[in-house]
Image (cartoon, coloured by chain):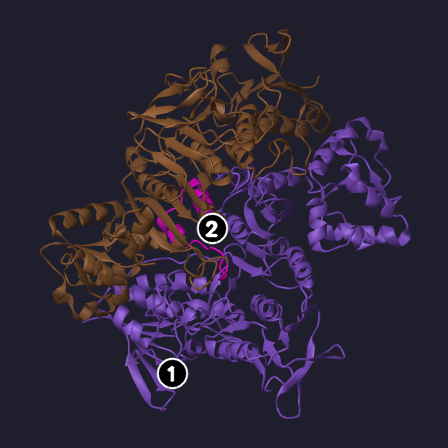
Chain colours: A purple, B brown
Amino acid sequence: MSLEVVIIGAVAAGPKAGCRIKRLDPGARVVMLDRDDLISYGGCGVPYFISGDVPELEGLLSTSFHFVRDAEFFKGAKGIEVLTRTEAVAVDRKAKKVLARRLDDGREISLSYDKLVIATGSENLVPPIPGVELEGVMPVGNLHQAQAVKQMVATGQLERAAIIGAGATGLELAEALNDLWGVEVEVFEMAGQVLPGLLDPEMARMVQTHLQGQEGLRLHLESQVQAILDDGQGRVRGVSCGGREYPAELVILATGVRPNGRLAAQAGLEVDERGAVVVDEFLRTSDPDIFAGGDCVSLPHLLAKERVSLASGSLANRMGRVIGTNVCGGQARFPAVAGSFCIKLYGLAAARTGLDQDQARRAGFDPAAVLVVQADRAHFHPDQKLMYLTLVADRKSRRILGCAALGENGDAVVGRINAVAGLLHKGARLEDVSNLELCYAPPLGAALDILNAAANTLENLIEGRLRPMSPAEFARRLRGCEKEGAGDTVFLDMRAMDNVAPYLECHAPYWVHLPQETLAQRLDEVPRDKDVVLICNSGVRSYEAQCLLNHHGITNTYNLSGGVAAVKLWGEPILRQTEKEEE
Amino acid sequence: MSLEVVIIGAVAAGPKAGCRIKRLDPGARVVMLDRDDLISYGGCGVPYFISGDVPELEGLLSTSFHFVRDAEFFKGAKGIEVLTRTEAVAVDRKAKKVLARRLDDGREISLSYDKLVIATGSENLVPPIPGVELEGVMPVGNLHQAQAVKQMVATGQLERAAIIGAGATGLELAEALNDLWGVEVEVFEMAGQVLPGLLDPEMARMVQTHLQGQEGLRLHLESQVQAILDDGQGRVRGVSCGGREYPAELVILATGVRPNGRLAAQAGLEVDERGAVVVDEFLRTSDPDIFAGGDCVSLPHLLAKERVSLASGSLANRMGRVIGTNVCGGQARFPAVAGSFCIKLYGLAAARTGLDQDQARRAGFDPAAVLVVQADRAHFHPDQKLMYLTLVADRKSRRILGCAALGENGDAVVGRINAVAGLLHKGARLEDVSNLELCYAPPLGAALDILNAAANTLENLIEGRLRPMSPAEFARRLRGCEKEGAGDTVFLDMRAMDNVAPYLECHAPYWVHLPQETLAQRLDEVPRDKDVVLICNSGVRSYEAQCLLNHHGITNTYNLSGGVAAVKLWGEPILRQTEKEEE
């Protein structure tokens, strides 16, 4: 008797599980169903299809070698029977049958299984805003909606768009419409930062500053859209927010997704409080003959004591393979997740893995974090770009808890985060990153890589030699001094005079020049009665100064993390007239 | 009493140790000496200075923010006294004194120490070839020699150069002279591959193929230069090799380096059989008051049961910090090394970490290895390039032993290897890489990353589902069939007809077309009396086919690793007339 497998959902986890099953047990009978007629696609590629980077929709539906992954492909190349436009309506666990309905003719069919795979994905959250039902308002969740948007923009019907939600999809779509097609885009976000939950506030602020430099793109943070406006004929004409109206021919709802565990819940399987299917480390549901994977499940977080649902084609694919193995009798385990994430927006890449400092605190750790700014390869190599990297570790155990980075060389940014992701999963400690054996050649890395340097810096902090100050706190204090003409803080600029002159002009008397190499001879010039912020270009020389001052018992100093470079990307003008900013 | 530290050697490990000491203990007295007048430089940057990527020599001598790291800089900014052009001639361990000689006036000085740091680096191997003493023959080891070469090339005195040695420095210099300045370069290498000891033979062959496509660069492998030729006036005029003469105005000796442990040995410290200083995990020599680091020491290999000396500015810097910590009473450990390495040549990056299959076998493992070819990001993204990646693991324990990769997006290549390097150090197993939580977004990664895919493929091999054939073995068999007009092998091409037609024309009757999606219906067409090589573009569809054939008891098949893509980069023409090769 050959194994009978039914798979519900044919986008990522489902097809991957099905293919793995057929490779392990070519005699198995695998039937896969999906409500849609377009299956097995790269949904994360939608913004790149809309922008035109991916010219044809087929690009998202094809294998690397241009086979379109349709039902016929799965039949011929994979030996999997696919029923498209077929909705699973119920699971009879006792009889081990799935009841499904064909959407085109309403016919019901019953499919028996030995093992069932639930890969029902996620669904778009529709915000409770008046007007969401208007024509021209849509989530961009599936390829049909993507085609509709591409059609509008490519035929010149779109000049202004409003995007509700500054998460990953919202921002990728904003870039696709704005940068490539010149559409004026307004992005509205209820949170006080872009990419909430995905990047820590400091990194998010740096992304925000970068976005605010893009023509035709406007971000509205802490902004709740009150209504989507009707043109009188049932089509959208704009949105209203904060008492103002913003005209738009298209409104995209990008307010997030939630796991779709409805079918599983109806079948009596365990789901969590957000409706996600609960699975064990073998990706089995509470019924051992039913597996689930992809966006519809929740998984334990590697470090936080909670279960998380992450909509990710990458997780879904990896889960699909583990399910396939286990459906065929294997014992493959799926690990807890650290939440690795990356995005590229207008040439700037951001990535993270693990916890940020606040998340780590909430998870019960005693975290310390540093921000380091350094060239992403040999600083003398012409391809080098500055990278901004935050590393988080627990003070006591020195266990690495998370890492985030930003930079223009996206592969370089992601490469660092991926290295940390692997280490996180192996319980690595600070010294593992200090001594991480990264490859080195001038075009491809730095002799002392930013990851090594960040771990060293974090050790200095934990051991009390380094007292950092964040760009945010620096800005708050600078603005305070500016307002009062003085204050409790003195900014001690340790760079060369040609860097410093405009700052002195702008911020005397609370901005003082004291080159680091002269410090040992001029210790008595360091103010003792105020907080002293030590400033250099990247935070390295000022750390050197802090060590010397500590040694002489002068401990009223703070080292500006990442130096002037970090403040610049963070987006605070240090000089009142920004045109005076040095290059 | 303040701590007195003497550091011998001021290039990488020495300065790093000194700076760390001064930060931990600003009251310490640190004296650093070096034979040269140019110190603290990025020696690995020499090829980029010669090419012009780094326009001024100062670039290699400066900090990120353009401070030249000379003796004055170390005095002012770091509080370290540097004695340049000063050679350490002896260490009196009993009296705890270093005897040194000033090269300019011959004066001897004596420096007492509490702790001594030996960072005497490596020295160039000079091959025993007649003529090495001629003018115009030089190693490119230090900045003075680099300046001399740059001067020649920039003033048009150099049209033809011979480089002896196809290691990393030899090939980087070859590119610098050839690609940027148009110099005709002949590279001579005694081994049968480029980058011997640095890349496995298969990856090295792929690099070789790439190099052989560059105009004005010629590689001579398994070629020993017999003599360097005199122009009659004591200047070089070329080299002779294999009975031929190759004219050249410059001969660069790039035959490698050896650790310089002479001073340590003279002082009675333990050195290994290659002359490298033996240090423990705290980087202490056999005298607990003397530390050593950088190119002059040997370290235990992480996986092979041997000590290795790796000349690397990156290792040297990391060692310097650990020495600094321990000189000040700390207990920092330096880990064993996996030998992470990378290089970029004419736009192609190659990187590796850990052991290749042969090295693993010699180290007592039972290794399995796979070659995987896949896009380095979403295959539909326009920036994607193919990456070629080999993963090695032990069959029994499934421990990861090594990884190597090639590709045009250098940061993407190095990012994968760095992730594996971290995992290697944590004793990771195959399933850790299968499920490695890499960041994913279409411009920055693939939903199922090449690392995940390689681990999955290697699992398939170890579990007996996949029987791979290397590009080399494929080429051997194809050439055999071609010669005989047939043979013991049939090549079963599983791609679409438009790919396959020229191959059929060229290689009938031993090349047979059988599209993978039709295989289930045509099992009886698969030959049983010969070895069958399953072929597709990248090795994925042919693996699918192999699983189906295994299931039906047809086990005389081999899957071409990396498919046609791998054979192409490996550099074997599959068609006799290469102009017929498909794009």
Q: Seen from this angle, which residue lies furthest bottom?
A: A233
Where are the magenta residues, as a range? B417-443
- Which of the 4 image quadrants contains residue A249? bottom right
- Which of the 4 image quadrants contains residue B527? bottom left
**Picture coordinates of residue A91, whole percent (x, y):** 36, 80
Q: Is residue B358 left or right of residue B134?
A: left
- Which of the 4 image quadrants contains residue A18? bottom left
Q: Give the residue displayed 32% in from the left and 30% down from the top.
A: B191
**Picture coordinates of residue B220, whole percent (x, y):** 33, 33
Q: Is residue B231 magenta?
A: no
Q: Seen from this angle, which residue lies furthest front?
A: B232
Q: Is any atom of residue B281 visible in this view?
A: yes
Q: Which mark is residue A85?
A: 1
For the residue labelled by badge 1, is the local secondary structure a helix, a strand or a loop?
A: loop
Q: Is residue B421 above or below residue A570?
A: above
Query: What amino acid type is highlighted by mark number 2?
Result: Asn
Please state, as top left, top right, bottom left or bottom right, where the C terminus of chain B lies in the image: bottom left
Q: Which mark is residue B409?
A: 2
Query: Alpha-carbon distance for marks 2 and 1?
Result: 40 Å
